Amino acid sequence: NFMLTQPHSVSESPGKTVTISCTRSSGSIASNYVQWYQQRPGSSPTTVIYEDNQRPSGVPDRFSGSIDSSSNSASLTISGLKTEDEADYYCQSYDSSNFWVFGGGTKLTVL
Amino acid sequence: EVQLVESGGGLVQPGGSLRLSCAASGFTFSSYDMHWVRQATGKGLEWVSAIGTAGDTYYPGSVKGRFTISRENAKNSLYLQMNSLRAEDTAVYYCARDNRVAGFDYWGQGTLVTVSS
């Protein structure tokens, strides 16, 4: 079984850049795509990154994703932070044994 | 416009059963794998079940043998039959469309299931 571990919370000021990590416990991070979802309070999740680093239409290019095989982790980077970016962010990946797995979520505070 | 609308949530006693439905529109339902994902209050997301276009089904250990996912393509509908419900099954249940790269691209608004005596 594998797990995806995220920091519980991060905070940064408007206009700054923040990076949220997602570390895979076993198996290669590169073996299956990583997705990132944003969930604002009281709302359903929406996709901000799919296929490790692709942005759906409508998601600003302030959002970017990457993977790092050396640390077996994925990262979501948000630049030019806005107060509207304040939300919970979840990474998610897959394997044939555990199927669809989510990270525990990271609460982003923009203050 | 893709829309997913869940229904069927409510209060049920431990050991009871409930059937959730998800009405899909705005896309060719029969061409997509579909999922149920749940979220307990104040907690993270947990994948609950998946069904492929051919009717193949998948479950995590926490619900296997108790939950059954199904689909009715003629009605553009997805279902989740939940039996032997436990307090720990209390959550908002979301219907989600598979994005064809092992993730999810569209989510419904969710339906709340509360298991309590």
Image: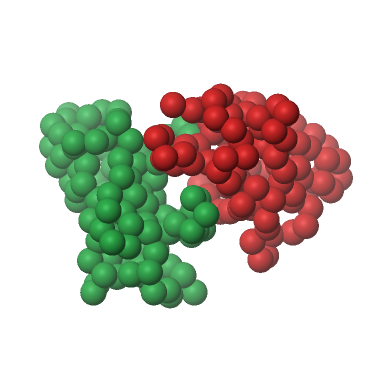
Q: Is residue B34 left or right of residue B86?
A: right
The structure's colour scheme is by chain
Q: Is residue A37 visible?
A: yes
Q: Nearer the viewer, residue A35 or B87?
A: A35
Residue lying at 86% horizontally and 45% vertically, measured from the top left: A15
* Figure disc tally: 0
Query: Image quarter for residue B74?
Result: bottom left
State which quarter of the image contains the N terminus of chain A.
Answer: top left
Residue lying at 50% horizontally and 51% vertically, measured from the top left: B103
Q: Is residue B68 left or right of residue B35?
A: left
Horizontal and vertical percent for residue A68?
72, 35
Query: Image quarter for residue B28?
Result: bottom left
Q: Is residue A45 left or right of residue A12?
A: left
Q: Is residue A14 above or below residue B5?
A: above
Residue lying at 57% horizontally and 40% vertically, measured from the top left: A31
Colour-to-chain, red: A
Horizontal and vertical percent for residue A37?
58, 47
Q: Is residue B53 above or below residue A17?
A: below
State which quarter of the image contains the C terminus of chain A.
Answer: top right
Colour-to-chain, green: B
Horizontal and vertical percent for residue A32?
55, 43
Q: Is residue B71 left or right of residue A90?
A: left
Question: In the image as oriented, which residue stretches furthest toward the right?
Answer: A15
Q: Is residue B79 visible?
A: no
